Image (cartoon, grey):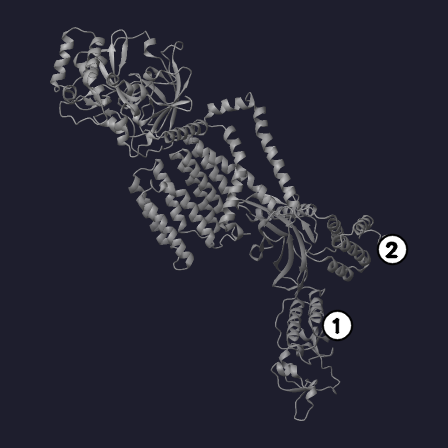
Amino acid sequence: MSLLSEMARPVADRWRELVQRWLSRRSPPSRSVTLDHGKLFIVPSRAGMGFLLVVVLLWLLGTNYENNLVFALTFLLVSLFAVLPVHTFANLSGLQLQLLAARPAFAGDYAEAEIAVSRSGGRAREWIQVYWSAEEGASLDLFERSTAEICVALPVVKRGKVRAPRLRIESRFPLGLFRCWSWVDLDIEFLVYPRPIAAGPLPLGATLSDSESSDLAAEPRALHGGDDFAGLKPYQPGDSLRHLAWKQYAGGRDLYNKEYESHVDARLWLDWDLLGGRDVETRLSNLCHWALQAEREQTAYGLRIPGIEMAPSSGPGHLQRVLTALALFPVRGGVSGQSK
Amino acid sequence: MANQSELLPRESLLWIFAAQFAALLPQFALLPLWIVCAWAFAVYWRLEVFRGRRDLPGRAVKLLVVALTVGGLALSYGRWFALEPMVALLAVSFTLKNLELVSRRDAFLSLLLAYFVAATLFVYEQTIPYALYGTICVVVITAALAAQLGHFSARPRRALGLSLRLLAQAVPLMLLLFIVMPRLGPLWAVPQNKSGASTGVSDSMTPGDFTRLSKSDKPVLRIAFDGPVPAPEQRYWRGLVYSDFDGRRWSQGFGVDPREGGVVRWSGREQSLPEVGPRYRYRVIQESTNNPWLFAMARPISDTRGVGETSDDRIIKRGPVYSRFAYEVRSWPRETLTDVRELDDFQHRRNLQLPRGGNPRTRAWADEFRASGLDAEEISARVLKFFNRSFTYTLKPPALGVDSIDEFLFGSQQGFCEHFAGSYVFTMRAAGVPARVVAGYQGGEWVDQEEYLLVREYDAHAWAEIWIAGRGWQRVDPTAAVSPERIRDGLQNAAAEEFMADSLLPLHRIGILNRLRLEWDMVNYRWYQAVVSFDSDKQQNLLKKLLGEVSPLRLAAFIAVPVALALIGILLWLWFSGRGRRLPPASRLYQKFCRRMARAGIARRPGEAPRDFARRVRVEKPALAPMVELITAAFEKAAYGEDPAAQKQLRRLLRQWSPGANFMFLKTVGAGRIATGE
């Protein structure tokens, strides 16, 4: 049995690949797609098969009782079944899907794409579903309006640039007996930030010189309360209020005064090397968490990862740049601490 | 995709219950009361579940309910292979399904079942009202299917409208299928609808039977002639022959009914009657009587399947007539047949049989005839003359005692056809002439310029036949001797006063109502002829009429041409309804521009104003900006300023410019033109 499944897997893969290739020929990726007969598929749904079964039973009833009214009903249902795909098809045909925005997301979360679905012409469209996975889909009607903007979510696991698979748009209107669908590629690419993983409090003032061992850094708690709080000096009566570290105070610390005379770099650096001993993804995740935390606390923060250094700052634009840098960090994989 | 385990919304449930109710409503009267109550209770329970006041029943409860209903069905019916228990089973399955109506799948299942239940209705009745009701059922069930999608579709008007529209579109194809789909015979024996007591003329005659029949105006037979039509006084539709008299009750006697070993020549066997010579050809459509006997004139032959001729000159059906039944008959008037065999000994004795005692005066009177040496016809003439002298024809004869014949003939002298026929046959037999009572219908009413003869229940009649050596059985109608108008004009005129006094409302006096009734009957008749009795013979005839000859090629064309036309129609509809209103020229040009921009990688968002779009282009694709701004300005001028020059300019710009092409060159050209244009 396992042999059979071993043999079946390449076949299934090959088949999937063929289908994908065929699909991409039929409906190439584009930010705006209009559904037409070349892109739409239609088959009876399971309820439709049940309906056909009822039709067969009715035909048997009519034949055995030689009952023309039962025959008439049978033929009426057959004809209804023949008319339905036209309506189901017409419900999707001519619809235009356009990607408005692909919002960035954190790994392990859902990435959302904003899509505009619009119809041309006066024909109302009903009960249209757009989804990647059935649970996170959006359903819409174009009844009195001609355009609807929807949000479709895709679960993302890995950071980086994630190309969304083909989006499924489906309708069972009007009776649910036929399923008409299309796989459209709206050329959606999500920027996925690393999954934020807490790594202790912000490494305020904790800058490590290259010479220092990573053992120290492995204990972020040891940083807390050490002499290395060179940038901040406990507040003493008489100190200038202008230099009070309000933000840290708001963060629940004691009252400190910012020590500007100091030559030590007092700014918050989210440093790769602070997190020695962990693998790449964990480090990125921790940095991501710190960046979010710092942004929440409105502390200026900088980023130092191999190859990139960003000066401390804050604000949504800065956060986005930092997170993007983290997301696009070229090295992947579990263990890179040893390689460093 | 719809989640399969999704709970059904309120509209869904209500629509399902409405569909079930519509499909079950006509069956409520036939189903045992407990099933109706169980269904109603299941609906109530399910609604309570929806309101959150109750849970769906657990496994144990469900099993208990199944056991109870199966037991109930067994108790109510006692047999399974019949129509009613099967319909009851469907109704019960509705009920049980309601107790676990959870997912969309259950909903679909329930509705598909509803279609089937609606169809079983037609097995009971195929009349126009039932057909209309069935149509309503299908509309409601289809609407319920549509409503399962929820949202707009669940609104009553929308769902019903959608359902009507879809079904209306399905009708043409349905008609085509109805005409061309071959009708196979029954594939296996199915239980027939056996509900209802037998109606009409019964297999025995006791005083009062025909008086009862005379009170009903239910149609019984519809007879259409092909060729000559018999005169009114010849229209005797024989159904039963009573040869056995027990002093009060006339009956067929043992051994006549095929179930008791009676000889029946089923159709398809060799024909003993001449194919040539005068005869009547007619087609009888008989309403359900739940009895096997059919009605025809004397000496009938039928080629219809399942119809046979009996030895006493009648036709019968193999099984009871449970639903409307049509049969073709050829009848030879008795006068035209010369080859008459002798009455065999058994028949002779049977048709002279009398009860051992009773009615002494009649016997004595008959003995006088026998003694005087008169032949059968002369005796008959004497008896009829006696009737004619002092008897009255009435629907309300006085009650008679033990010697009923004596009391009638020499006492009350008031009676109905059954009294005349019975006493006549008694007298003839007592006088030594073989005689028998024949029951059936007499007369009928023409409908719509003699298209067909409508025979109603009140046309039920009893008359006599006597055996005359050398001529065979001859019909004698003693009632005609008393009341000739009964035979000529029918009961309504013969006993007009009594007839009207009996009916609840004197409707017969109102001419227009009577006309309407006949019109309605004609509609029914046409319906039956065209739809209900449309069989493979009629199908062949119709196809021949439509196609000239029935060849596969023509048949294929007959099917393919309408289907192709429908397809073209649908495609045109798709094309026109999907295209939208025709935009003004400036907007069309602008859309062309937007399409080009989309190809170049920057698409205008839906609802984005042209000016905003131009601004966005300037940010995202600065290289395209100058031209885009020119085009936008020209479009705004053309569309809002209604400036024809601007429109021309827009067209010119678009003709030359494409965002993908060499932009620098075109830019200069475009700019030059604009410069000259302004």
Find residue A275 and report its horizontal and vertical position in percent: 67, 74
Find residue B311 and report its horizontal and vertical position in percent: 29, 16
- Residue at the image position 43 percent from the left and 36 percent from the top: B131
Q: Is residue B442 above or below residue A53?
A: above
Residue A122 visible, this orientation: yes
Chain that bears disc 2: B
Amino acid type at circle 1 is: Glu
> Is A33 in front, or is A269?
A33
Q: Is residue B139 above or below residue B381?
A: below
Residue assigned mark 1: A309
> Is B592 in front, or is B620?
B592
Q: Is residue B428 above or below residue A204?
A: above
User: Residue B398 vs residue B22: left or right?
Assistant: left
Amino acid type at circle 2 is: Ala
**Circle 2 SS class:** helix
Find residue B470 and report its horizontal and vertical position in percent: 27, 6
**Mark 2 or 1, which is nearer the eye?**
2
Find residue B56 and report its horizontal and vertical position in percent: 40, 55
- Residue at the image position 34 percent from the left and 12 percent from the top: B333
Residue assigned mark 2: B675
**Circle 1 SS class:** strand
Q: Quadrant of residue B244?
A: top left
